[in-house]
Amino acid sequence: MASLPLATAEVCDANSHLITNGELRALHPIFQIYGRRQVFSGPVVTLKVFEDNVLVREFLEEKGNGRVLVVDGGGSMRCAILGGNPVQQAQNNGWAGIIVNGCIRDVDEIIGCDIGVRALASHPMKANKKGIGEKHVPVNIAGTRIYDGEWLYADTDGILVSRSELTV
């Protein structure tokens, strides 16, 4: 992880060549900011699920080691695939952040956690528990294809994904 938090606007200004060749991409500004940590970055772990949170919970039970879990929940607005307990566990296990292309719940609890959380919206209904999904696969969210192992940088201006780790 970078020694100093990288400002996404400065990263864009300084790396126009990486934007031009597609190595640095900005996600469409569709995510709401949750979680106390508004600036976060780390290597990406991808997960694809639909209205099911078993695999999300399994990942967050592992040591995060400063990684960012990117969950493609298919953009579902019918239930939450992330809640307060797994976010608390993610914080305790050293995850830097979680991006959810879908909904979360337990917003007040999540706001109190020192971890970066972005999601489309909040929803009170819980997800299914069938354990169906795909781990470490490329996902398409917010106009961008994101691969396992890429780097994600988030701040209050937005979210960037880079093929490799960026330095200040």
Image (cartoon, rainbow, N blue to C red):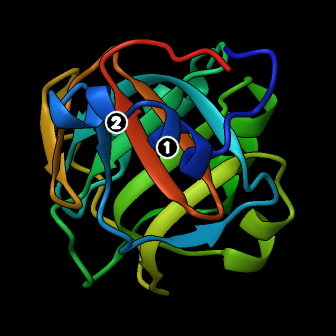
Percent of width and height locating residue 9: 56, 51
Label 1 near label 2: C-beta < 8 Å? yes
Residue type at the position of mark 2: Ser
User: Residue tagged by mark 2?
Assistant: 16
User: Residue tagged by mark 1?
Assistant: 13
Quadrant for the N terminus, please. top right
Q: For numbered disc 1, what is the local secondary structure? A: helix
Percent of width and height locating residue 17: 28, 27
Residue type at the position of mark 1: Asp
**84 in relation to 114, above or below:** below
**70 in relation to 60, above or below:** below
**Residue shown at the point (66%, 44%) measured from the top left:** 7
Mark 1: give few (<14), some (14-19) or many (20+) Cα within 10 Å: few
Percent of width and height locating residue 113: 82, 54
Mark 2: give few (<14), some (14-19) or many (20+) Cα within 10 Å: few
Locate residue 91 relative to residue 118 in the image: left or right. Answer: right
